[in-house]
């Protein structure tokens, strides 16, 4: 821990020293780009080749969002049936190696071979902020919401902690904390189980024209934020330049988080540790596509009903003649 | 009771059953209360499956409602035959369908509904469903009819 702190202090010192340079570079440009007036969703570009795994983004995220973290009331109400799992991270707030209700961004480690040389890569992982987010669209209470700037977030005042968003998410991103939220005021024993938490892409900072804390804190300018079309252009240019690969452009029908890596994501996926709170890097089909196709079929339903009624009327009037 | 009427009733009740079941399955309750653990009912805890079933049942319900309405009109049966109870059920069904269609639109890509609008839609859709269920139960018990 000590070494981590001193490294952080060192990096902070470096950032201060380079302040004037930074002010005119990435962050300033990003801040300018997010205040644009058109309604195109914002996306972030993460250049994995630049990430040094220093966790500055992780700690900046924790600092910027500390006031949003759950403060559960204990003891937790008894829930029925007794098999309903209590998920309590309130005594493990320091965990930074996975996603938790108190850690919305973490660094994943991978090693791969590039041009015959073994290299280590570090990947900042958090919510992908899908273009058509299943967590938002399938939330039964409307507690998860998407904003026009492309971010999705969970309203802690409305969430009942049913964890449907986590099951619907192709990356299992949201994490639950028991003992907090609206369910305590309803039927805590019989329905609900806390509140779900995940990256909200610092919506409150974006509202003020500031960039998300993780982007601002990064000493290596790993992340860039801007209108999605511009971010995609940059991602493709970067991928061409490094002969690299893109993740997030088409996953789940498209996300607002675009990774560029010098190593194929299939290889990275084999190397990273996945599991609870540690999302994969698999290819992901568009989870909402079937629903979208059926929605189109729904337009035909009233026409079919009318045609059937008219057909019956036509046949019976023919029989009458 | 003639065959057409019987078929219509079967279609209505089967559709209502599946649309209600898949609708309730949109809430994470079937797994919690072990219902999804009953052999053959595991799909009730699979949100994408129940989502698709709900949409398919909605397509059938919309087509059916439109068919019955226009069949009634084409037959020249006259709206004055519809009972007060029938009109009440029609209003509830209309509310259920309108809020449901708006929710389907909301779920399309690149569509943004205001947060309050989404909550109002969710709650009103659930309320219309609950009212329809109670009213349908009442109509079965008290033998209330759509038309006089």
Image (cartoon, coloured by chain):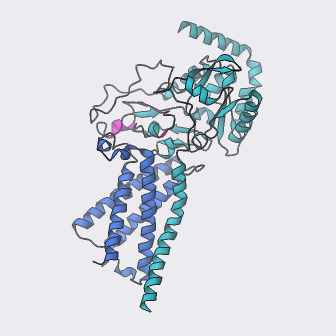
Chain colours: A cyan, B blue
Quadrant assignment for the C terminus of chain A:
bottom left
Judged from this view, the residue extending furthest toward the left is: B141
Q: Residue at x 53, y 9 (%)?
A: A1
Magenta-colored stretch includes residue A174: yes
Q: Residue B60 falls in which quadrant of the image?
A: bottom left
Position of residue A154 in the picture relative to residue B135 (left or right): right
Compare residues A32 and B64 and report the one nearer the observer.
B64
Q: Residue at x 39, y 52 (%)?
A: B23
Position of residue A173 in the picture relative to residue A205 (left or right): left
How many numbered discs? 0
Q: Is residue B123 visible?
A: yes
Q: Is residue A209 visible?
A: no
Report x, y in % for residue A52: 65, 17
Q: Residue at x 50, y 70 (%)?
A: A304
- In magenta, the rendered stretch is A168-193
Compare residues B137 and B85 and report the one nearer the observer.
B137
Report x, y in % for residue B100: 46, 57
Q: Residue at x 29, y 34 (%)?
A: A79
Q: Residue A188 falls in which quadrant of the image?
A: top left
């Amino acid at each position: 821990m000590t070494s981590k702190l001193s490294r952080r202090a060192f990096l902070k010192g470096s950032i201060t020293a380079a302040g004037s340079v930074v002010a005119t570079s990435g962050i300033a440009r990003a801040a300018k780009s997010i205040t644009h007036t058109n309604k195109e969703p914002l996306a972030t570009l993460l250049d994995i080749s630049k990430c040094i795994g220093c966790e500055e983004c992780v700690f900046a995220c924790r600092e910027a969002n500390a006031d949003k973290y759950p403060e559960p009331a204990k003891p937790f109400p008894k829930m029925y049936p007794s098999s309903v799992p209590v998920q309590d991270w309130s005594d493990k707030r320091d965990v930074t190696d996975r996603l938790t209700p108190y850690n919305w961004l973490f660094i994943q480690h991978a090693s791969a071979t590039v041009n015959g040389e073994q290299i280590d890569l570090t990947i900042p992982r958090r919510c992908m902020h899908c273009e058509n987010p299943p967590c938002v669209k399938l939330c039964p209470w409307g507690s998860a919401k998407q904003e026009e700037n492309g971010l999705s977030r969970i309203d802690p005042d409305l969430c009942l902690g049913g964890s449907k968003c986590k099951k619907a998410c192709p990356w299992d991103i949201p994490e639950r904390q028991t003992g907090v939220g609206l369910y305590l005021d309803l039927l805590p024993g019989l329905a609900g189980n806390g509140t779900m938490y995940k990256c909200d892409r610092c919506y409150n900072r974006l509202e003020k024209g500031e960039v998300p804390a993780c982007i601002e804190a990064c000493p290596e300018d790993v992340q860039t934020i801007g209108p999605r079309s511009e971010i995609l252009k940059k991602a493709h240019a970067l991928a061409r330049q490094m002969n690299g690969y893109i993740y997030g452009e088409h996953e789940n029908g498209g996300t607002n988080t675009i990774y560029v890596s010098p190593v194929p994501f299939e290889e990275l996926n084999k190397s990273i540790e996945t599991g609870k709170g540690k999302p994969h890097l698999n290819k992901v089909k568009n989870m909402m596509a079937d629903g979208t196709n059926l929605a189109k079929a729904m337009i035909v339903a009233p026409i079919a009903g009318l045609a059937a009624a008219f057909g019956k009327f036509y046949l019976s009037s023919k029989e009458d003649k | 009771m003639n065959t057409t009427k019987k078929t219509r009733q079967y279609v209505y009740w089967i559709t209502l059953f599946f649309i209600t079941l898949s609708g309730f399955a949109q809430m994470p309750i079937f797994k919690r209360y072990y219902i999804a653990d009953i052999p053959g009912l595991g799909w009730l805890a699979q949100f994408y499956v129940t989502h698709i079933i709900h949409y398919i049942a909605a397509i059938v319900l919309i087509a059916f409602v439109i068919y019955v309405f226009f069949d009634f009109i084409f037959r020249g049966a006259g709206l004055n035959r519809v009972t007060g109870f029938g009109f009440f059920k029609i209003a509830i069904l209309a509310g259920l369908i309108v809020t449901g269609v708006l929710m389907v639109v909301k779920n399309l890509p690149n569509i943004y509904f205001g947060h309050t609008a989404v909550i109002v839609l969710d709650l009103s859709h659930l309320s219309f469903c609950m009212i329809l269920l109670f009213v349908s139960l009442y109509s079965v018990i008290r033998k209330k009819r759509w038309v006089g």
